[in-house]
Image (spheres, rainbow, N blue to C red):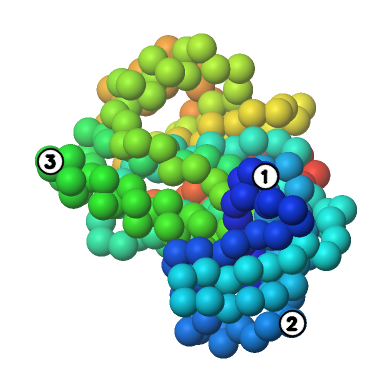
Amino acid sequence: MFRYFCSDDNIINNNINVTGGDARHLKTILRAQTGDLISVVTDSSEYRAQIEEINKDDIVCRIIEEIEKNNEAFINITLCQGIPKQTKMETIIQQNVELGVKNFIPLITERTVVKLNEKDREQKKLDRWQKIAKESAKQSKRNIIPNVEGITTVKELVERLKNEDAEIIVPYELEDMRLLKDVLAEPKQNYYIIIGPEGGFDIKEIEMFKEIDSHIVTLGKRILRTETAGVVAATVVMYACDEMK
């Protein structure tokens, strides 16, 4: 069933107007007809709605019932991802949204190859990544659209995390003693998972993370690609916190 995200204010007199790209998708791709049902997800609730009118610029739906179901995890995971080459970031966001990650921070590191020197180019990337998050949220029946924050440097991230009440997890290929499962012996509410780009983290960056009491961990004997590491780490955290049932 098609999933439409909007604010509570968009529901007026039990009606909702689907507009923009969502309306075009319903009409041209899904071939929606009057009488068809869709899911409407707001800031506070989820509803089942029926299509009443299909117009040129919008689709008018009537709310039928509220759905008592929450597909969101109790814990909050933010994935701080060293920006990889090509379109890997899109795959990373897509898969981690499906898994239940709630927030993304694209990260510029010492070994990041991708250079975003122009604000316009940076914003286009962010807009594209946010669109991927939205589409993946629809597909995986999320109750929220995870947020893709602005591009951040390691130094900026470290300053921010000094004031966060969260477990900070940094998988590092040169760590061979501390296991991720040891960090998760006692589940917490908030987690930051910080993943380096293709070349991994510079040792100076690891030292910066250690200064704020981050957990530098190994994900096992085998070296994982940057697009794999975040999914693996987030999955382990979800499982340890009993969020995979």
Q: Is residue 101 left or right of residue 86?
A: right
Disc on res. 101: none
Q: Secondary structure at mark 2?
A: loop
Q: CA distance from mark 3 to mark 2?
A: 49 Å
Quickly name the residue at label 1. 8
Q: Is residue 231 left or right of residue 67?
A: left
Q: Amino acid at mark 1?
A: Asp
Quickly name the residue at label 2. 35
Dot 1: few (<14), some (14–19), or many (≥20) neighbours within 10 Å?
few
**Residue drawn at (74%, 53%), measured in percent from left and top?**
13
Q: CA distance from mark 3 to mark 1?
A: 38 Å
**Residue drawn at (31%, 62%), measured in percent from left and top?**
87
Q: Secondary structure at mark 3?
A: loop
Quarter-of-image position of residue 179? top right
Front residue (pair 232, 220): 232
Which quadrant holds the N terminus? bottom right
Image location of residue 28, percent across then percent down = 48, 84
Q: Nearer the viewer, mark 3 or mark 1?
A: 1
Decide: is 33 above or below 64.
below
Image location of residue 123, percent across then percent down = 26, 45
Q: Nearer the viewer, mark 3 or mark 2?
A: 2
Q: Secondary structure at mark 1?
A: helix
> Disc 1 or 2, which lies upstream in sequence?
1
Q: Are marks 3 and 1 in contact (CB under 8 Å)?
A: no
Q: How many marks?
A: 3
> Disc 3 or 1, which lies upstream in sequence?
1
Which quadrant holds the C terminus? bottom right
Quickly name the residue at label 3. 117
